[in-house]
Image: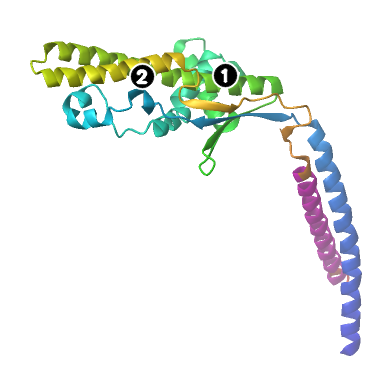
Amino acid sequence: MIEGEVISLQSVATWLRTARMWIICGAVLGAAVGLTASFGLTRTYRAEAVVVPVSNAEAGSGLSGLLSQFGGAASLVGLNAGSDEKAESMAVLNSRAIAEKFVVGHKLAPLLAKRRAHDGDNAQSQSALNVRAVNRFRKSVLVIAEDRRAGTVSIAIQWKDPVVAASWANDFLELVNADLRARAIDEAEIALGYLTKEAGEAPVLEVRQTLYRLAEGQLKTISMAKSRKDYAFRTIDLATVPTPDEFVSPNRALLFMGGGILGALVGAALVGLLRRRAVTFRVTAS
């Protein structure tokens, strides 16, 4: 009984020594393969602009009391003293509509999406191509992150060309500001036209004065929107071109470690397989 136990322990020790060599060799080989593969993969660079959402409420400062006193007319033209400009700006920044406007405006569909065999040259096929391009742009290229503690927002582009990545990041920021500026001007001009018309027809002096003061606020909004380049997002840092070594993928350290772990597992599996076959052969021979 004791002799059998000694033989069993010796066989286990021998197997462990053999397994250790296989596992080490597998880990080294897997790490080497992973590291080698990382040099052959396409590099992806990340260019990031940092901005701060701003409020343009000062354009209509002093009007909150007027809006509460004359809420009926204000609501008709879309004026709301409790509106959250920053929330609206963030919603536009993350919207599919602004991403589509950027992709279509920069004609990125051929770069971001491949034409399929059944795609033709008609408008419907081009629309489908644009949809696929926008999906990839939002999923893999554009990265928007908000730091609520610092009050900043990062707008990053991940692309294989570092110069293009920086250019797209800054262009996207400019597009968002331009879009929000145009929206503000359009809304203010519509409100201004309505308020001016109503003020001219109002029979009560106090009502006319209130409407004219509301209209004055819209004029301030239009003036500020036209004169302020960073209308909704004030730029803290523009995106700069990453250096050739500042790529975010492939992650060589991760591939090296992952290759080593995978190689070790393969080595352990091979040892187990060989041991099982050896045991089967012994049983068959006996």
Label 2 Cα crowd, 10 Å radius (few <14 / some 14-19 / many 20+)? many
Label 1 Cα crowd, 10 Å radius (few <14 / some 14-19 / many 20+)? some
Q: Quadrant of the C terminus?
A: bottom right
Quarter of the figure with residue 36: top right
Which of pointers 2 and 1 lies earlier in the amino acid sequence? 1
Place of residue 138 in the rendered image (x, y in percent of width and height, measured from the top left): 53, 29
The amino acid beneath tag 2 is Thr
Magenta range: 254-283
Q: Is residue 107 left or right of residue 227?
A: right
Q: Is residue 58 left or right of residue 9?
A: left
User: Which residue is at the front of the view, 233 or 268?
Assistant: 233
Residue topped by disc 2? 221
> Can you say whether 32 is above or below 237 in the image?
below
> Can you say whether 278 is above or below 34 in the image?
below
Rendered residue at 9%/18% (across/down):
204
Mark sitting on residue 171 = 1
> Can you say whether 234 is above or below 28 in the image?
above
The amino acid beneath tag 1 is Asp
Mark sitting on residue 120 = none
